[in-house]
Amino acid sequence: MALIDSHGRTINYVRLAITDRCNLRCTYCMPQSGIDFVSRDDLLSYEEMLRLLKVFKSLDVSKLRITGGEPLVRKGILEFLEEIKAQQIMDGFYLTTNATTTLSHVERLVNAGLKSVNISLDTLDRQKFIDITKRDQLDNVLASMNAFYQSDVRIKINMVVTKGSNEADIVPMAQLAEHRNIQVRFLEEMPFNGLNEMKTQFMTHHDILEKLKTSLPNLTSKPFEHGSTSQNYTVEGWKGDVGIIASYSRTFCGSCNRLRVTPTGQMKTCLYGKNDLDLRGLLRDGSSDEEITQAIKHAVANKPVDGIAAERSRFSTISESMATIGG
Ligand code: SAM
Ligand code: SF4
């Protein structure tokens, strides 16, 4: 029983943010202090998440991404992932992580079904890493990245390009893909910094492409893949490739196939939109799986056509941190 929205898009991908907590404080994502993290009781429990994933499976949702906050900081995450595998709920999972604490868990993650990892990394310069994340963790991230690479896990690096901060790192970051079969992706900064502050100037996907082309003139565009958020490019002679995600310009919504579940169990049919369905409420008020299924189908049917329409449909301006949505 597939989930299809009223714009004809099949929704088969769920992004599950399992915590809003994080061991870093990336400036574009959350303030350095004064954050009201969600209390444990307000988070979905692992049992609730397993039940929900079974409901999604029955709706032909086959792709699962685990995100956060930083997913690895929630106690019990590895056992949760192993349980998904043991119960054969999903055919593996994808992970988005800052990779600061993954080094000792690579083997266990792979054995639990890790298909591909997105590592968030915005610079290769140690001091700039500290400036952006407020923590001295670059060495751990690079060591984890190497360990994932040795394990043959598909790696994508996500770099948020922030005007006035790491523009000069775009080309050195791209060069990570020169000798390794990895994809380095550049994201437009979005206004989800938890500060209720809209920046007036962003590096757009056009700006990022121009910056890349100045050093890599033979960058060649690949055909756009349905369901992808990135426009990808190859460079002759490189093992890996690069991608640009127009996350603020929102050029890719037409082939959107995803849903988000926040750490408190709110379902969002669009990153930029409001919370569309209180799944936690349903899970805790005695609703049956069939009732939850119908509620999900109803919410999906009303998925906004794109992120611009979704933002217009909000009751308020964007003020939340990306850590409460999962990216
Ligand atoms: N902590 C993990 C990490 O950083 O990979 C997972 C959660 S994080 C919220 C998910 C993704 O959102 C990361 O790739 C991060 O770079 C991205 N992100 C966070 N805030 C953003 C913003 N304001 N604009 C664009 N991307 C953002
Ligand atoms: Fe943490 Fe990820 Fe947000 Fe950085 S982007 S503060 S690593 S949740």
Image: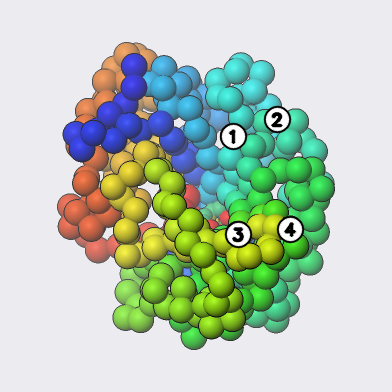
User: Mark 3 packing: few (<14 Cα in 10 Å), some, or many (20+)?
Assistant: many
User: Mark 2 packing: few (<14 Cα in 10 Å), some, or many (20+)?
Assistant: many
Mark 2 and mark 1: span between their CA atoms? 8 Å
First-in-chain label (1 vs 3) = 1
In this rendering, the label closer to the viewer, 3 or 2: 3
70 horizontally vs 29: left or right: right
285 horizontally vs 188: left or right: left
First-in-chain label (3 vs 2) = 2
Mark 4 and mark 2: span between their CA atoms? 24 Å
* Numbered circle sitting on residue 207: none
Q: Do labels 2 and 1 touch, CB within 8 Å? A: yes
Q: Is residue 273 above or below residue 32?
A: above
Residue at the spot 57% in from the left edge and 61% down from the top edge: 234
Secondary element at tag 3: strand
Residue 154: x percent and y percent?
67, 45
Mark 1 and mark 3: span between their CA atoms? 22 Å
Residue 265: x percent and y percent?
41, 37
Res. 246 image quadrant = bottom left
Q: Which residue is mark 3?
A: 241
Label 3 sits on what residue type? Asp
Q: Do labels 3 and 2 touch, CB within 8 Å? A: no
Label 2 sits on what residue type? Ala
Q: Which residue is mark 2?
A: 112
First-in-chain label (3 vs 4) = 4
Q: Do labels 3 and 4 touch, CB within 8 Å? A: no
- 80 or 2, which lies in front? 2
Label 1 sits on what residue type? Phe
* Numbered circle sitting on residue 93: 1
